[in-house]
Image: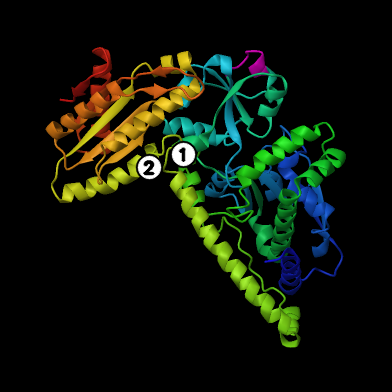
Amino acid sequence: MPSSVRRFVLMIIATAFFLPNTQAAESIKVQLRWLHQFQFAGYYMALEKGYYANYALDVELIEGGPNSLKPIDDVLEGKVDFAITGSGVVIDRMEGKPVVAVAAIMQTSPIVWISLKSSNIRSPIDLANKRLLIMPPPESAELLTMLKHEGIDIDQLDIRNTSYRIEDLIDNKADAYDGYISNEPYYLKQRGIEYNLINPREYGINFYSDVLITSQTFAKNQPELVEHFKAATLKGWEYALDNIEETVQLIHNQYAPQKTLDHLRFEAQTLKKLIMPELVQVGHMNPGRWQFIANSYQQLNMTQADAGLKGFLFEADFKPNYTLAINIALGSALLLLIAALIIFKFRKLSQQLHKSNQLLAQQALIDQLTQVRNRRGFLEQAKTVLSQANREQSHSSFLMFDIDNFKQINDRYGHSAGDAALIKFANMLSSHRRQQDIVARIGGEEFAMLLIDADIKSAEKIAKRILEDIRHAVIESPNSDNQFNITASIGIAAAHGSIEEFCEKADKALYQAKHNGRNQIVIAE
């Protein structure tokens, strides 16, 4: 669709379906989540371009900071009308607070663990017994959820409240820092400091971020106003992402002069990848993903509430003004053409949205590095295939693998070589996988394989072939001419009883194999 036609179509939609209010401007207060920066670009541009004014909204943006990380109470008490917060808002909803999610700007959270390269902290398992600076729960719960999914006991970690100073990491007052992938890495790069990022998304944890919220009372009493504010805000975000340089200049001149233009550009390009406007309509929220986030918080014992999420997502409950649209339809054949173009565009967006949701759901089950299933994906599929195997009374076996001395590979050849070893190992396991079997990466260098319709004797034969392939495999370091070999230890158990039971048996057998000298197979009793 030509851009001129698209702009005309959007103008007709805005006029016909959401007629601007001709009465006195409505005062609206919005609490931002943090200090002024590109993180709130859509709100700035909605003001600058008059999108709020078109709906007779007089919007005030209130800067946030360390003391405004939980603005939900201000929303519920009526001190502000809207606020931007994290996905932890779902906890408040489950615990009975009448808060409503209007839009989720970021489809993926920017929050990551940051460590210095010199610390050799590169994966979740490396965080054990380290000094960790993190924002108070439920902020940054993605980081804790990742650790729990990787089998790390959070109660035994040295977790401390963050100082909001990246200098504490640089000065060795902490071993890992809870930061934004769009912010702190820029400072470290500017100072020539090498760093590592541990991103929850790479371990199957994919939370929303920068969620626009309001109170249930406000949404119920003024649904048209909420819908207008949402529409203007999302239009502001679309403009900001399409015109990054103009937006960066505005933020630097009017909101954040302390941030350099280069820093704002870095933030803009990074956040655009998390907002994913090419794949998902800006602000989109999926009820299934919200339920997964809620379940994750429950598993972390951040809440004991089990209330449903009905009514948590905002739905406009008012009748738009169709008068002008009807008049145009009756008086102009041009509107019929525009309507056809709109239907075509909406159908295409709906298809793209469906594909995007499928992609996001698949990413939550797949280990992004090795492209085999992650721990969550393994558990979900294992329940299904084992249930069918039990009905058919066929034997199943479970194998646990651990790459021997994996830390030495990272230390000697670098993290990229370690990644190459993991990918190679996963490919070798997959080459021995039959159609009904499951291969998964369940930890840093730990893998699992569920063999359906295979007793212990058959499983041992397959394990021996895998072990032989591993011994002869040559792995090339991506960043050098180095080549090296790996070995692995294997524990085998019959897949009887619950998944937890045979996983524990195979894990003990694996431990025995490593205790016996590694590079061997042990079968659980």
- Element under label 2? helix
Report which quarter residue 64 is drawn in: top right
Q: Residue at x 59, y 40 (%)?
A: 109
- Element under label 1? loop
Q: Which residue is mark 1?
A: 204
Q: Position of residue 16 (x, y in %)?
A: 73, 74
Q: Is residue 431 above or below residue 401?
A: below
What span is in magenta?
168-175
Q: Residue at x 42, y 23 (%)?
A: 476
Say whether residue 169 is magenta.
yes
Q: Main secondary structure of the magenta part?
A: loop
Q: Which residue is mark 2?
A: 377
Q: Nearer the viewer, residue 18 or 302?
A: 18
Q: Position of residue 162 (x, y in %)?
A: 64, 25
For label 2, count other residues whose C-alpha is less than 10 Å away and answer few (under 14), some (14-19) or many (20+): many
Q: Label 1 near label 2: C-beta < 8 Å?
A: yes
Report which quarter residue 89 is drawn in: top right
Q: Is residue 77 visible?
A: no
Q: Is residue 416 above or below residue 34?
A: above
Q: Residue furthest front?
A: 481
Q: Position of residue 38 (x, y in %)?
A: 74, 41
Q: Nearer the viewer, residue 27 or 284?
A: 284
Q: Is residue 315 above or below residue 424?
A: below
Amino acid tagged 2: Gly
Q: CA distance from mark 2 to mark 1?
A: 9 Å
| Colour pattern of the rendering | rainbow
Amino acid tagged 1: Gly
